[in-house]
Amino acid sequence: MPKYTTEQGTLQNVVCPKTGKIVGFKFGVRLPRYRGNMLSLINGYYVNVDGVEYPQDAMRFEINGKPPRTWAEIKQAVWEHWDYLDTGWLFIEKEGGLAKGKHTVLATCCNYEQYGYKPATDQARVDNVEIPSVGGAGHTSAALPLEMEIQ
Amino acid sequence: MATIKRGVSSYSYQNVIFDRKMGYRDFIRTIREDLNTDGVELIDETFINHYPFITDEFVYDWRNTIARYNMKSVTMDVYLDVLQFRDHVMTFEEGAERLKRDLHIAARLGFENVRCLRPIPAEIIDMCVDTAEKEGVRLGQEIHSPVQIRYDPEKDWNKARGNLVDERLVEHMLQRAEKSPFVGLVPDMGLFHTGVTPALVAAARRTIQNDDCVDYILENRNKLPWQDLKRLVAEKFPTIDTDAQITLSLIRPQASAKPEELMDIMHIILSIHGKFYEMVEDPTKPGGYYDPSIPYDEIMKILLEGGYDGYINSEFEGQGHTNDLPDDQMFDELEQVRRQHKMLVALGAV
């Protein structure tokens, strides 16, 4: 797994174009493996910024030139590929965004990419909603936190 | 005359590729210019954008780049993500459709072989042999530790690892190969992994933070079965997590076969994964290199004796042992592959 899968220099607040207010923040992430995979396999991200964990329904994921999507929408992207070298963007809803200055960002991918069949977990992953954890899932192990700055 | 040829899998350069410093054209050119050889092995989803809907532009540019540098597309490595559809586990019939598509993509790109993973069920392989013949691409199943060449149920770890693996994979492939020249095996040299590399030991010392424990494992790992050693380590060092990946890597050799067993399958080897973890200078041969964890001298002797006529494609996998270090202390993947090729030539590859 690559050392950092969160992209340095990408952290920024997000402004709503209609109201002009800061509605959250976003940063870029890369696939934490050595190959791309179908987008539907991304079950979510564990996100922790400065010790604060963010819930799955506060996140949207932007990739492939499409508007940011919920994890439920990403799950349906069964014929859409996350190309290996592409950056995906995690949007996190947070009124007022993050303060200017340095932040410690940890984002661990919950990716159902795997080598063939795993009878002990396959059906459970279809039947149950797995909440992404700090340790990752399958081949995706814990990511390293990255200190990033909002200018 | 049978010759052992050299190539490289894109897996070897995964950090450089991740950092966007090596695209597929650079990858192909590097094999020619850095190693003076022609074998190319591709991890499909590393470089094929929009997979499985490969574009004509990519097909033409891949073939053009291969032609430009006088290269050979030897093996394409393909996967099986069985949870793709999310509302059900991929059926074997659906898995076969993916593998057939992969064979078709490989044919368009000009590959001689497709390597599928070891946990691909026999039923799926059986459903794809006709397509391999039709596409003119040989279908090779990987034999990767802990799969054995000579099956011994006492030593079968696959079930413990939770993968659905055909335990008689080698036997079944030998039977299929009697009927079709378009099936075979792609053995991974991690099958013969018995030793440790300096980078692994250093990584273990950094992670375990207990030199007495690391020294104890190193002193005993060749004297005891790994299960016994694991139990003893847990008893002597109760604070150490013996199931942690790095601790297990140190305690448990990956080997699930012996080099001489390659003779059983020599005639159906399509290509070889030249797995390695670290090339270090050989104190007995100035200017020479070896991997202390995998006995390439024995392996190459058997391959030469057996008349193996095909490619060994480098698969460098040591990155994980230095990825926690500052950038300038991480492995230089290009240099590691250069050293392995120097060794392969010294041991008889062309």
Image (cartoon, coloured by chain):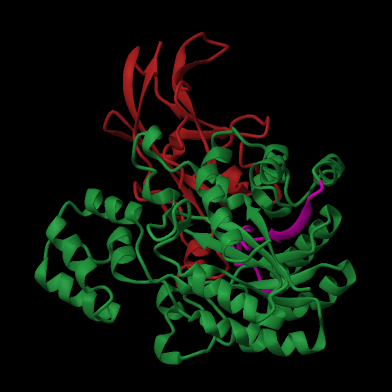
Chain colours: A red, B green
- Residue segment shown in magenta: B70-92
In the rendered image, the vertical position of residue A96 relative to residue B270, given as above or below: above
* Viewer can see residue B182: yes
Q: Quadrant of residue A107?
A: top left
Q: Is residue A3 magenta?
A: no
Q: Residue furthest right?
A: B134
* Residue at image point 55% right, 45% down: B14
What kind of secondary structure does the magenta stretch mostly adopt? loop
How many marks can you see? 0
- Which percent across, then down, holds residue A86? 61, 35
Q: Residue at 29%, 77% (x, y): give it.
A: B226
Residue under the image location 14 percent in, 55 percent down: B210
Q: Is residue B185 left or right of residue B230?
A: right
The residue nearer to you, when weighing A3 against B41, is: B41
Reply above or below: B270 against A94: below
Specify whether residue B163 is in view. Answer: no
Q: Is residue B71 magenta?
A: yes
Which part of the image, by quadrant, shows the C terminus of chain B? bottom right
Q: Is B179 situated above or below B250?
A: below
**Image point (32%, 18%), residue name:** A102
Residue B281 appears at what percent x and percent y?
Answer: 41, 53
Front position in the image: B326 or A98: B326
Q: In the picture shown, does residue A12 fall above or below B205?
A: above
Q: Residue B274, how many percent across, how many down?
A: 57, 62
Residue A106, position as x, y percentages in the image:
36, 35
Question: Which of the 4 quarters of the picture holds residue B326?
Answer: top left
Image quadrant for the N terminus of chain B? bottom right
